[in-house]
Image (spheres, rainbow, N blue to C red):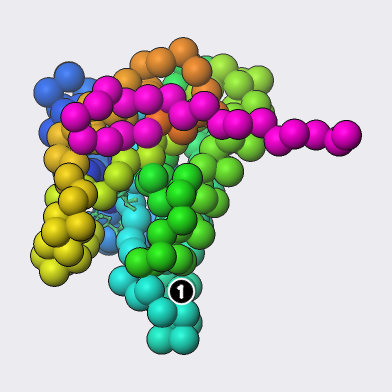
Amino acid sequence: MTGGASGIGAAIVARLLAEGYEVDSLDIVNGFDVSDPAAWEAVGPVDLACLNAGVITGEADLELLTVGQYRRALGVNVDGVVLGARRLAHVLEPGSVIVATASLAGLVGVPDDPIYALTKHAVVGFVRSVAPQFAERGIRIQAICPGWADTPLTDDAFKGELTARGFRLLRAEDIAEAVLVAARSEGTGEAWIVQPGREPINYAFKGVPGPR
Ligand code: NAD
């Protein structure tokens, strides 16, 4: 479980504990940096791995985006998932499941934070693309794609603005529920949309038209 110290991760931890799992939370606040390849070398097998740590850049304007903001978002949101999945490919037993926390920002454009959208599209594309090789070994990998939630990821001003625009914020607990739904479904390489007041939905990707 990465990013388990706050927000959605903390809700996933609480839910998994309530379900009887033993949970190990790997978080930067406890000294585990998901973007550090060496950190993953100590990670062993689990039944359910949640690759959840993530950050926003908080910058809508590309001209103002700093290289530090850009690299941090790619490091946590993309490297953190890829390096985690790479290690898990090495250690997981058949029957295990990986759930990566992507975002609706992995399926739609996000003018408020284009780099965040870039990283979450990467997570969705990665999960869909590595699912077949995990499937050969009896391991499933799923992505969840929640809309904006009421967590410390975004500041109160942003959340207030969203609410004023008519958005309803998700509760972290609803997303924890969606993690279990995605983990327990029989599918793999799927992207589960999570929105307020709805059951999690397995997103039906439209195929490309193909040659004429
Ligand atoms: P949060 O800020 O409350 O929690 C993120 C956690 O990740 C924190 O505990 C933080 O310490 C940890 N973290 C940050 N950098 C790390 C690193 N380098 N290594 C290890 N841990 C690190 O945010 P949240 O809202 O709980 O977000 C969790 C996930 O859900 C993220 O991937 C986020 O992109 C995604 N998500 C959030 C929302 C939302 O609106 N909050 C919506 C959709 C998806």
Residue under label 1, please give it: 70
Whole-percent x, y for residue 127 in the image? 54, 38
Whole-percent x, y for residue 89 in the image? 56, 35
Q: Is mark 1 on a helix, strand or loop?
A: helix
Where does the magenta region start and end? Answer: 193-212
Extreme-top residue of the structure: 186
Magenta segment, prevailing SS (helix, strand or loop):
loop
- Sort mark 1 into few (<14), some (14-19) or many (20+) by Cα contacts within 10 Å: some
> What residue appears at the point 63 percent right and 37 percent down from the top-left corner?
129
> What residue appears at the point 20 percent right and 57 percent down from the top-left corner?
165
Image mark count: 1
* Quadrant of image for the N terminus: top left
Q: Quadrant of residue 39?
A: bottom left
Q: Quadrant of residue 208?
A: top right
> What residue appears at the point 51 percent right and 59 percent down from the top-left corner?
118
| Amino acid type at mark 1 | Tyr
Whole-percent x, y for residue 50 in the image? 35, 37
Q: Does residue 126 appear left or right of residue 46 in this picture?
A: right
Q: Can residue 99 be seen in this view?
A: no
Q: Is residue 65 magenta?
A: no
Q: Does residue 139 appear left or right of residue 201 in this picture?
A: right
> What residue appears at the point 40 percent right and 30 percent down from the top-left corner?
192
Whole-percent x, y for residue 92 in the image? 49, 28
